[in-house]
Image (tube, grey):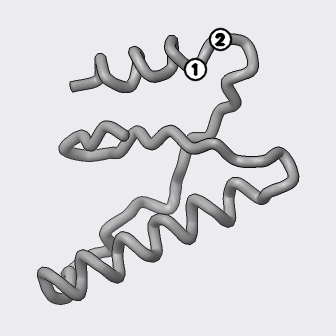
Amino acid sequence: MQVMPDHVHPLLDVSPKEDIMHITDMIKGHASFMLGKEFGVFRKPLWAPSKFVSSVGAVTLDVVKRYIEGQK
């Protein structure tokens, strides 16, 4: 995972049978809950409703890892 000032690059290994949109919503919800618990209530929503999801079938896992690490 790479955390940027305005977005996050996570790398997840998810079965094709799983609903990736549901999984990303759960991650965003849990992160919002934990950050709100630690830092208090936010004046505006923590996350934008948008998300980008892509499969990695055309490249190797190492290529994706290098891309994410290069986003620093």
Identity of the residue drawn at 65% across and 11% down = 59
Nearest to the observer: residue 7 or residue 48: 7
Q: At which x and y percent is residue 28? A: 45, 66
Q: Quadrant of residue 34?
A: bottom left
Q: Secondary structure at mark 1?
A: helix
Q: At which x and y percent is residue 68? A: 38, 25
Q: Which mark is residue 15?
A: none
Identity of the residue drawn at 65% across and 33% down = 54
Identity of the residue drawn at 49% across and 65% down = 27
Q: Is residue 39 left or right of residue 55?
A: left
Q: Secondary structure at mark 2?
A: loop
Q: Which mark is residue 59?
A: 2
Q: At which x and y percent is residue 69? A: 31, 23
Q: How busy is the neighbourhood of tag 1: few (under 14 within 10 Å), some, or many (20 plus)? A: few
Quadrant that contains the C terminus:
top left
Q: Is residue 43 left or right of residue 12?
A: left
Q: Which residue is mark 1?
A: 61
Nearest to the observer: residue 38 or residue 4: 38
Q: Identity of the amino acid at label 1? A: Leu
Instruction: Report the Cα–Cα distance between label 2 and label 1.
Output: 7 Å
